[in-house]
Image (cartoon, rainbow, N blue to C red):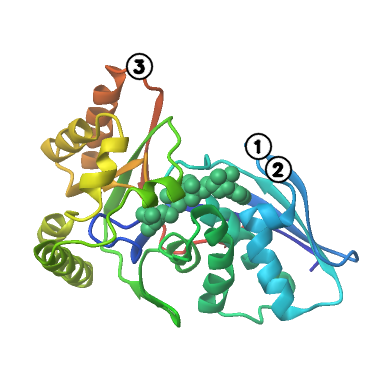
């Protein structure tokens, strides 16, 4: 096999209480990429469609993660990458990690699968660090493993795949403004109050338990964030109105997706998700800000081969 086409999914990081550790994978939106072996050594980005991004491998997250794998694998050939971007950079649903994951997943297939999912996550983290200026894997892990994931540690890297309860749907609203991950990290406090830490880790623990026990009511009570959201929500217009509309219409929880500006809601059942989507649309329709709303199942398989 000399060429592969893949679908690399969007993801929701943090999941309210799990800053930098929790994430889940979406299935209605993602990038496509073609990865091809070439006699010319190195990584060559030959096509980018959708958004204006750098072609130099060292400046594109797909190239940086690919170079990390290439250095380790050291094959006597190189790779060409074509990137068809559907996920807007800076949207908060893992645009950079979809690219970082896509290149290394495709290369691994063409190399005969020498690397496991944790090793792929490690290479992809090198690319993600280019975008956010720090290595974190809470978008990358769900894109590679699928479903809900918890990154127990990054050094050494340890990813836990969590169960996905049935009939769980995500509603995403993407206000069309750009918030760079690096900037929304910069506004966060370096220290937090002990009482907030206690609330936060109790919520992470109960959220994980809720996923294991299909306890939607406990899941709902765990989807709160007292550490990061109070700071970042100020960057997202009408965040509180969206949250109120989502909860009043039956969402289990609602929070900032990754570093924003996208906002996610988790819902039990498609009909509740559709109702929440409509209520959220109504909030943003009254504003001047362009937006997109979509409903997605939780993608339990993660990144996949298209052809
Ligand atoms: N292949 C790529 N795809 C997306 N962004 C890229 C890529 N290569 C470089 N970048 C840069 O990374 C930055 C976008 O990454 P950022 O982490 O801010 O957004 P995001 O991935 O959508 O957010 P989040 O991680 O919160 O979901 C932009 O500055 C963009 O130019
Ligand atoms: N955990 C990261 C995800 C965004 O890349 C953050 O919230 O900054």
In this view, the residue in front, 135 or 87, is: 135
Residue 307 visible? The answer is: no
Quadrant (top left/top right/bottom left/bottom right) for the N terminus: bottom right
**Spatial separation of the CA atoms under disc 2 and disc 1:** 8 Å
**143 versus 170 height, above or below:** below
Marks 2,1: beta carbons within 8 A: yes
Quadrant (top left/top right/bottom left/bottom right) for the C terminus: bottom right
**Spatial separation of the CA atoms under disc 1 and disc 3:** 25 Å
**Disc number placed over residue 48 in the picture, else none:** 2
Report x, y in % for residue 298: 36, 55
Report x, y in % for residue 171: 31, 42
Q: Is mark 2 within 8 Å of ligand 1?
A: yes
Q: Earlier along the polypeptide chain: callout 1 or callout 3?
A: 1
**Spatial separation of the CA atoms under disc 3 and disc 2:** 30 Å
Q: Secondary structure at mark 3?
A: loop
Measuring 22% from the left and 70% from the top, which residue is drawn there?
208
**Within 10 angstroms of label 3, few (less than 14), some, or many (20 or more) residues?**
few
The residue labelled by disc 3 is 288
Asked whether, in this view, residue 5 is left or right of residue 254, the answer is right
Report x, y in % for residue 94: 47, 51
**21 versus 172 height, above or below:** below
């Amino acid at each position: 096999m000399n060429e592969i086409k893949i679908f690399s999914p969007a993801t929701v990081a943090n999941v309210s209480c799990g800053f930098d550790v929790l994430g889940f994978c979406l299935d209605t939106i993602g990038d496509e990429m073609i990865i091809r072996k070439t006699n010319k050594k190195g990584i060559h980005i030959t096509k980018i469609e959708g958004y204006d991004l750098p072609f130099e491998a060292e400046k594109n997250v797909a190239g940086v993660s690919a170079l990390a794998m290439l250095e380790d694998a050291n094959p006597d050939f190189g790779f060409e990458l074509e990137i068809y971007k559907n996920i807007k950079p800076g949207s908060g649903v893992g645009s950079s990690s979809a690219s970082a994951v896509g290149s290394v997943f495709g290369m691994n297939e063409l190399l005969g699968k020498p690397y496991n999912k944790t090793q792929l996550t490690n290479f992809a983290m090198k690319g993600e660090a280019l975008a956010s200026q720090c290595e974190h894997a809470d978008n990358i892990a769900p894109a590679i493993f699928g479903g809900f994931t918890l990154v127990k540690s990054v050094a050494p890297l340890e990813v836990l795949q969590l169960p996905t309860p049935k009939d769980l749907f995500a509603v995403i609203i993407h206000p069309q403004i750009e918030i760079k991950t690096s900037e929304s990290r910069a506004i966060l406090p370096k220290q937090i109050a002990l009482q907030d830490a206690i609330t936060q880790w109790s919520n992470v623990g109960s959220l994980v338990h809720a996923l294991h026990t299909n306890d939607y009511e406990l899941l709902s009570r765990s989807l709160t964030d007292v550490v990061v959201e109070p700071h970042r929500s100020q960057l997202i217009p009408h965040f509180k109105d969206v949250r109120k509309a989502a909860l009043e219409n039956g969402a289990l929880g609602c929070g900032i997706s990754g570093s924003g500006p996208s906002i996610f809601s988790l819902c039990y059942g498609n009909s509740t998700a559709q109702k929440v989507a409509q209520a959220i649309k109504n909030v943003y329709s009254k504003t001047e800000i362009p937006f997109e709303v979509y409903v997605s199942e939780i993608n339990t398989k993660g990144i996949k081969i298209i052809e």
